[in-house]
Image: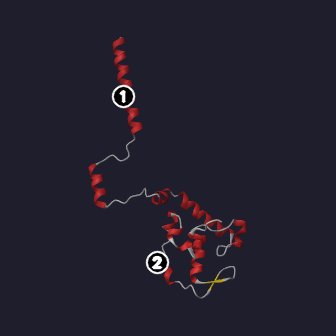
Amino acid sequence: MKKRNRRIQTKTPSLQKRFNTRIRQEYIDQDYIHKLDDTKKNCKLPDGSLVTELEYMAIFMKEWNSGGVGKQKEAKKNRIHRTAKEVKNCTDRTNSRNRDQYGVAKARNLVHTVDNEALAEFVDKGVDVASNSLEDALIDYLDYTKKVNESTGESNE
């Protein structure tokens, strides 16, 4: 028997940060979720069905934020985004978010914040941040070969 994970057992996983990828967690920022009604079905979806406010938000976030939409040619099967253009917009947004190097670095804890004083001190020291060691090595090599050629040229004359 296959074990069911917690995300499947949760009613609205698309609204909870811990059930989403670290890249998408930044976009789940609704502090009013607890105020949405989950008792009365009073929100009408574009397909005609009625859902509660909380369910509507969960469906929207699943499609909008998580890219949980079908293929463009099967757009009518989606619950909210039902045109090919809307589906393409959702998938493009998800793909661009996954390609974003800054977002990926933040998700991997590779981005660290520095307070202004420490940054100003770092700049004032004049530390060369982007040193190109390969370029420096090539310059040193060219200088060396120039010296060798000059020394051998003088001794041959």
Which numbered circle lies on residue 143?
A: 1
Q: Residue at x 69, y 79 (%)?
A: 47
Q: Residue at x 65, y 73 (%)?
A: 81
Residue 45 point in image, percent of width and height: 65, 80
Horizontal side of residue 107 vs 115, given as left or right: right
Q: Residue at x 27, y 52 (%)?
A: 124
Q: Earlier in the sequence, mark 1 or mark 2?
A: 2
Taking depth in this image into account, of 103 and 13 the one nearest to the observer is 13
Residue, far top: 157
Q: What secondary structure is marked by label 1?
A: helix
Q: Quadrant of residue 154?
A: top left
Say above or below: 112 vs 59: above
Say above or below: 31 vs 21: below
Q: Amino acid at mark 1?
A: Asp
Q: What secondary structure is marked by label 2?
A: loop
Taking depth in this image into account, of 89 and 65 the one nearest to the observer is 65
Q: Quadrant of residue 94?
A: bottom right
Say above or below: 155 vs 126: above
Residue marked by disc 2:
31
Q: Amino acid at mark 2?
A: Asp
Name the front one of labels 1 and 2.
Answer: 2
Q: Quadrant of residue 131?
A: top left
Residue 20 point in image, percent of width and height: 53, 67
Q: Residue at x 34, y 18 (%)?
A: 151
Classify the position of the C terminus by image quarter.
top left
Residue 21 point in image, percent of width and height: 53, 64
